Image (cartoon, rainbow, N blue to C red):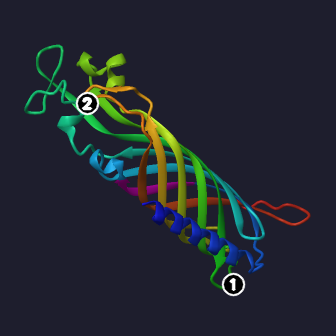
Amino acid sequence: MKNRIYYILALFSLTFSLSAQQGKESDRAWLIGAGLSANTVSGDWVDRYRENYSVSAFVGRKFKSNYTLTAEWSYLFGGEVSDRQGALKNVFTPDGQLINISGSYGQVNINQRGTYFNLGIEKTIPLGRLNKNSGLNIGLTGGYMWHWLNVDNVGNDSPQIIDDYAKGYDRLGSGFLLRESLGFIYLSPSRLVNFKLSFEISQIWSQDLRKYYYPVGELSGEPQLNLLYGLKLNWYIPIYLGGKTEEYYYN
């Protein structure tokens, strides 16, 4: 796993170095946008979660060199739990039901949640001379992530998993995140269509913030390496900057 990460970082470093030698100039702009990503998990998360999704808000400052400095906030959701019975085995009946305060079956939803913030740099390599703002796009970002097991008791009628008891089941964790992306960005000369489609790999070095998880007992607190592989679509509103006098174009 470590060799794979080092290989990816070396590849991105070489690509940045080669692209910097092109000396291409493009428009300066602020890029404001939103994104949607579909992700698969790897690492320690494989035994806990299935596929998940994330939505994001993005702002970037694009320079004439086609480098863009970025800031992005994302919210992760979905991630259905692989072992639902095991996640709440202390309170579930043998057939996977939860008894509420009225003695009937309570409704509970269990899935993955997360939020993270990234700062990064991107480089666009034009594939032609007609539109220097569009082309192959590579990016490298770093940030911090919080993730947890979301236990939602519909109606809040099962006291064994709400309020302070919920902290014994949420597997709250956090850690540093590194993400590499490779894709295609298109900023239309007509200012009407502006998007990026990319493939992303995220490495999250995290550890449990709770000391105890009721289904298994005390947690070790050892760092874990979790990975996300995602296909992402970003949609932008560019604000272009002129020369001596600045002109703004709104999409």
Query: Quadrant of the rendered structure where residue 157 is?
Result: top left
Magenta portion: prevailing SS class: strand
Is residue 109 highlighted in magenta?
Answer: no
Please, what secondary structure does the residue beneath circle 2 have? loop
Give the residue number, with chain letter if any, for mark 1: 130
Say if residue 162 shows up in the picture.
yes
Three-letter amino acid code of the residue under disc 1: Leu
Please, what secondary structure does the residue beneath circle 1 have? loop
Where, quadrant-wise, is the N terminus in this rendering?
Answer: bottom left
Q: Is residue 19 above or below residue 122?
A: below
Q: Is residue 238 above or below residue 172?
A: below
Say if residue 188 shows up in the picture.
no
Give the residue number, with chain letter if any, for mark 2: 216
* Foreground pick, 34 / 247: 34
* Foreground pick, 245 / 119: 119
In the rendered image, residue 57, in percent from the top left (x then y), is placed at 57, 49
Query: How many C-alpha atoms fall within 10 Å of the one at disc 1: few (<14), some, or many (≥20)?
Result: few
Q: Which-is-in-front pick, marks 2 and 1?
A: 2
Which region is colored magenta?
A: 34-42
The outermost residue toward the left is 95
In the rendered image, residue 202, in percent from the top left (x then y), is placed at 48, 56
In the rendered image, residue 41, in percent from the top left (x then y), is placed at 36, 54
Q: Earlier in the sequence, mark 2 or mark 1?
A: 1
Is residue 36 highlighted in magenta?
Answer: yes
Q: Is residue 12 left or right of residue 47?
A: right
